[in-house]
Image: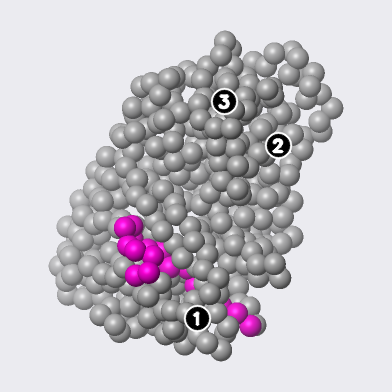
Amino acid sequence: MATHDVLVVGGGLSGLALACKAARAGRRVTVLEAAPRIGGCFHSHRSPDGHWFEMGAHTAYNSYGGFLELAEAAGVVSRLRVRGPQRARFGLLREGRYEWLTPAKILLRLGWLEAALHAPLGILRGKRGRSMRRYVEGLVGPRNYARLFGPFFAAVPSQCADDFPAEGPGSLFKKRPRRADYPRSFGFEGGLQAVLDGLAALPGVTVETGAEVASLRRDGAGWVATTVDGRRFESLLAALATPPDVAARLLALEPPAAAAAAARIRTVVVESLGVVLPRERCWLPELAFLVPVDDLFHSVVTRDPFPDPARRAFVFHFKPGIARETRLARMAEVLRVAPQDLADIVEQRLVLPAPAADHAARVAAFDRALAGAPLAVVGNWFDGLAIEDCVQRAFAEWARIAAVPRPRSAEARTAGIDVPAITAPG
């Protein structure tokens, strides 16, 4: 049995962001990750020769102040890479025909008469209480939404975004201040997961992979986590950084009202397949992503904004429930190669939140049930799926539970660790 100051269940961005804050405040933190790797939705696949591409989150922006703070704490800023001009080019696939677009060319595809008829009333109605589809259809009309906006919105969270709230928790787009000392959009050499690797190596942070937690329960003033292989971890404070279904299971004993609220968060499964091809075998022009209209997949994301002289990488984010053979056949068809040419396929299955217009009320109900518990719950199912949404939730949850006093023995154990605190933006 091991004793810790803070125990974090889940080693994705949210869990490691909270672990960073706790460790930099002088706490001993242990992160338990069920998978063989850390990262969660951050999955930078790396080949033995150093080639990498993103299976999950693929772009960071200088409006992600909290994430940049984590990158600085992780010591990886020197590995930052600016996205190249390919970032501004994308494809639209409709009924077997491909169109190569830029943001300006999208405007040329609008039915301007329909947009002009809808926009005045749509602006007056505003976003409050409206779904993405209802709000944007009110601005540009239903045909423009179905032809252009709906497919592009679905490509962002790799799922149909029609029912996403137009504003507030769960919404896709939020205005944030930008840091002028960083480029507008960027990644890192080795992928975005380089930030998480750096966080996992911080002084005061210990990460255990392959450590699936079977139960988490209160024990006196602290918590006890038991893994499926029988290990026990005790801590004063605990944090859950898991999908809502796992959180609901682990919260079933305490607090049970929070478990019930977590179970009401809607989710969807996204199954992704990634492949690397020799550059000479690729017919697609260099582009950031390809968006289909009514297809088996929501998007194809490329590594082209970080070009490699010999190879290109493509990741297809598929709708759930499609047989693997069917997915591979569709990939081969789009890439115009034989199915047997798709060697070394990388696969990923994620459970993502699927927020609807009432998402804010569901999150508020969860937070009310959690109030007062010395337990943080973080993830991409609160404020939104964006990287910065996850980071800010982790910062706020650490601030909430950090007020719980530490026993003197824990303070003595962490004495001598020179880890100054970092402060969340705002």
Question: Which residue is disc 3 drawn over?
Answer: 225
Q: Is residue 259 left or right of residue 399?
A: left
Residue at the image point whose x is 59% and y is 32% from the top: 229
Can you tell which mark lies on residue 403? none
Above or below, comparing residue 314 to residue 42 in the picture: below
Q: Is residue 298 left or right of residue 19?
A: left
For the residue marked with disc 2, what is the amino acid?
Thr
The one nearer the camera, 76 or 36, is 36
Q: Is residue 226 visible?
A: yes
Can you tell which mark lies on residue 341? 1
Above or below, comparing residue 277 to residue 47 in the picture: below
The one nearer the camera, 325 or 380, is 325
Q: Earlier in the sequence, mark 1 or mark 2?
A: 2
Question: Which residue is disc 2 drawn over?
Answer: 206
Q: Quadrant of residue 139?
A: bottom left
Magenta residue span: 310-326
Q: Is residue 261 left or right of residue 201?
A: left
Residue at the image point whose x is 18% and y is 70% from the top: 143
Q: Earlier in the sequence, mark 2 or mark 3?
A: 2
For the residue marked with disc 3, what is the amino acid?
Ala
CA distance for labels 1 and 3: 45 Å
Rate crowding at label 1 as few (under 14), some (14 to 19) or many (20 or more) other CA atoms within 10 Å: few
Q: Position of residue 266 (x, y in %)?
A: 32, 42
Q: Secondary structure at mark 2?
A: strand
Q: Position of residue 350 (x, y in %)?
A: 44, 52
Q: Position of residue 191 (x, y in %)?
A: 62, 61
